[in-house]
């Protein structure tokens, strides 16, 4: 007999079916055994009476064992119905009970929301932690949101294109994760901080509407809304201006919310546009929370922050790009860019939601001389620019349409939509605050010496042994 999901039993009263899953709880009432069985779709009460041929074996079953039960679906007595779950009006009267896998006592309860449990313990036993209803639902919502994104973008004429994971190390604002090459001794790949340059090359290639559900990697300090590896909804379009991108983003976000989160209210449409200057003066932040009532979890206050400065000074009093060097300045006057960088604004825009930056993008520079001037302000010599970005500048010589785009921090977006306080709650196997993935035990030092020799890598003494490693 083929197994059915618990949620499908509701319409099969009177039929004999087979279900399987994890045991949520076991209760004895006299000589009747009640087993709540949990699968991916929900939970089902099964009843094992003493006349059942597997009654003696069933009495040994404990929570979190994996079992298979065959029996008849009966309607529950009216007073015994549970309206809070889909299957609350029915139960399965067991005829056969088979233990598929026993389980030792799990390290923590999965019946609560999990916030009371030590984070390291949760991360170490993440495969158990994910059994809890809240996280199970978050992963389902993650799937549905990505699916709706793809459907929406496909309907709008976008083409999904995958770009390389092993790429080139270029200065984009954060540290790269480096990957040594065995075949090219002494040379390195870098994991992409974003597909920024590749998507611009796709505009040169004539793919006018590109998107990608892209994995990105940044070797930076982690926090509640940031991980070392994360997912972007990456979008780029040709022949657009700033307003075109903003209108499209509002249309997309509105459609996603209305489809998957109809209970939530978008505070204001069209989304307000706030200048960077106004945001900093009024709210002291470039990601203001515009909710009428910040305690209302169903309120979604979107806004675009625009008119960012193109450059700012870092702690060393050096000019750095506020967004990235490929952002188009609001002028193509090369002299003004290099001599008065403090006056230049970038055609950059951020989408903020309830005090969180969930997306950022810009219209891109497509004139090589402008790009070179920007890098000049950032302190790069012309030879360095050619060395690090010559591939892009060379491509632009063969014809490039004006273009721009945006990238959503997907997990951060989902974190806000689900009301979670930490990005780790919407990722299957996240890293801890200090960058470790505890289920697999990474990063690890158990690399064979022969592997290191092949790559020409040699350990140096760890200057900070308290942080682990060699």
Image: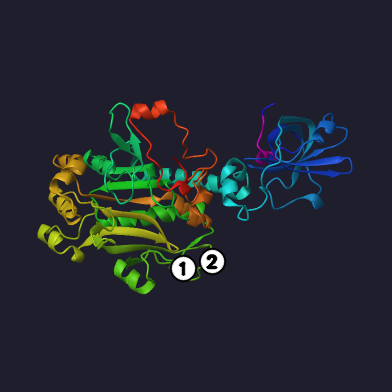
Whole-percent x, y for residue 375 in the image: 18, 52
Question: Does 107 sit left or right of 409 as displayed?
Answer: right
Q: Provide the secondary structure element on which disc 2 rests.
A: loop
Residue on which the image places disc 1: 291
Q: Gap between marks 1 and 2, in whole Å?
A: 8 Å
Residue on which the image places disc 2: 296
The quadrant holding residue 165 is top left
Q: Provide the secondary structure element on which disc 1 rests.
A: loop
Question: Does 361 sit left or right of 433 as displayed?
Answer: left
Residue 208 is at least partly visible in this image: no
Q: Quadrant of the N terminus?
A: top right
Q: Quadrant of the C terminus?
A: top left
Residue closest to the eye, 453 or 112? 453
Q: Which mark is residue 179?
A: none
Residue 90 is at least partly visible in this image: yes
Whole-percent x, y for residue 256 in the image: 45, 52
Q: Which residues are magenta?
A: 3-9
Residue at 35% in and 33% down? 457
Sequence-wise, the earlier of marks 1 and 2 is: 1
List the single residue furthest toward the bottom.
282
Q: Is residue 266 magenta?
A: no
Residue closest to the eye, 468 or 307? 468
Q: Circles 1 and 2: CB distance less than 8 Å? A: yes
- Relative to residue 175, is residue 254 depicted above or below? below
Residue closest to the eye, 78 or 462? 462
The quadrant holding residue 13 is top right
Q: Residues within 10 Å of mark 2 (few under 14, many from 20)?
A: few
Question: Does 199 sit left or right of 356 as displayed?
Answer: left
Residue closest to the eye, 180 or 110? 180
Residue at 45% in and 45% down? 146
Residue at 89% in and 43% down? 30
Q: Is residue 8 magenta?
A: yes
């Amino acid at each position: 007999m083929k197994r059915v999901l618990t949620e499908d039993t509701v319409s099969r009263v009177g039929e004999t079916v087979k279900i399987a899953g994890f045991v949520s709880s076991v209760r004895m009432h006299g000589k009747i055994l009640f087993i709540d069985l949990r699968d991916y779709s929900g939970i089902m009460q099964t009843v094992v009476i003493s006349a059942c041929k597997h009654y003696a074996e069933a009495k040994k079953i404990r929570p979190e064992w994996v079992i298979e039960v065959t029996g008849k679906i009966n309607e529950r007595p009216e007073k015994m119905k549970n309206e809070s779950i889909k299957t609350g009006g029915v139960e399965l009267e067991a005829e056969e009970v088979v233990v598929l896998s026993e389980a030792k006592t799990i390290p923590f309860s999965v019946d609560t929301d999990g916030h009371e449990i030590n984070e390291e313990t949760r991360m170490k036993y993440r495969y158990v932690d994910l059994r809890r209803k809240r996280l199970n639902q978050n992963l389902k919502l993650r799937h549905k949101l990505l699916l709706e994104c793809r459907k929406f973008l496909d309907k709008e004429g976008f083409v999904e294109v995958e770009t390389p994971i092993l790429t080139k190390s270029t200065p984009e604002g954060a540290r790269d994760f480096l990957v040594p090459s065995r075949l090219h001794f002494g040379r390195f790949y870098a994991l992409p901080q974003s597909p920024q340059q590749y998507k611009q090359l796709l505009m040169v290639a004539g793919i006018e509407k590109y998107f990608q559900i892209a994995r990105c990697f940044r070797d930076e300090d982690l926090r509640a809304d940031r991980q070392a590896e994360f997912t972007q909804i990456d979008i780029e379009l040709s022949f657009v201006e700033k307003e075109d991108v903003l209108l499209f983003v509002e249309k997309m976000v509105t459609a996603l919310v209305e489809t998957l989160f109809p209970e939530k209210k978008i505070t204001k449409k069209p989304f307000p546009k706030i200048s960077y200057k106004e945001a900093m003066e009024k709210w002291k932040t470039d990601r203001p929370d515009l909710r009428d009532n910040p305690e209302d979890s169903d309120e979604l206050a979107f806004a675009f922050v625009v008119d960012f400065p193109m450059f700012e000074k870092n702690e060393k009093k050096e000019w750095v790009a506020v967004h990235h060097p490929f952002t188009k300045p609001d002028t193509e006057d090369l002299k003004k860019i290099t001599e008065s960088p403090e006056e230049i604004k970038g055609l950059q825009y951020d989408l903020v939601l309830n005090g969180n930056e969930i997306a950022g993008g810009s219209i891109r520079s497509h004139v090589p001389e402008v790009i070179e001037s920007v890098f000049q302000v950032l302190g790069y010599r012309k030879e360095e620019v050619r060395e690090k970005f010559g591939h892009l500048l060379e491509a632009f010589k063969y014809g490039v349409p004006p273009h721009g785009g945006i990238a959503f921090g997907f997990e951060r977006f989902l974190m806000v939509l689900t009301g979670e306080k930490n990005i780790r709650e919407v990722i299957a196997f996240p890293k801890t605050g200090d960058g470790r993935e505890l289920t697999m035990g990474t990063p690890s030092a158990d690399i064979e010496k022969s592997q290191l020799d092949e790559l020409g890598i040699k350990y140096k003494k760890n200057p900070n042994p308290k942080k682990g490693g060699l």
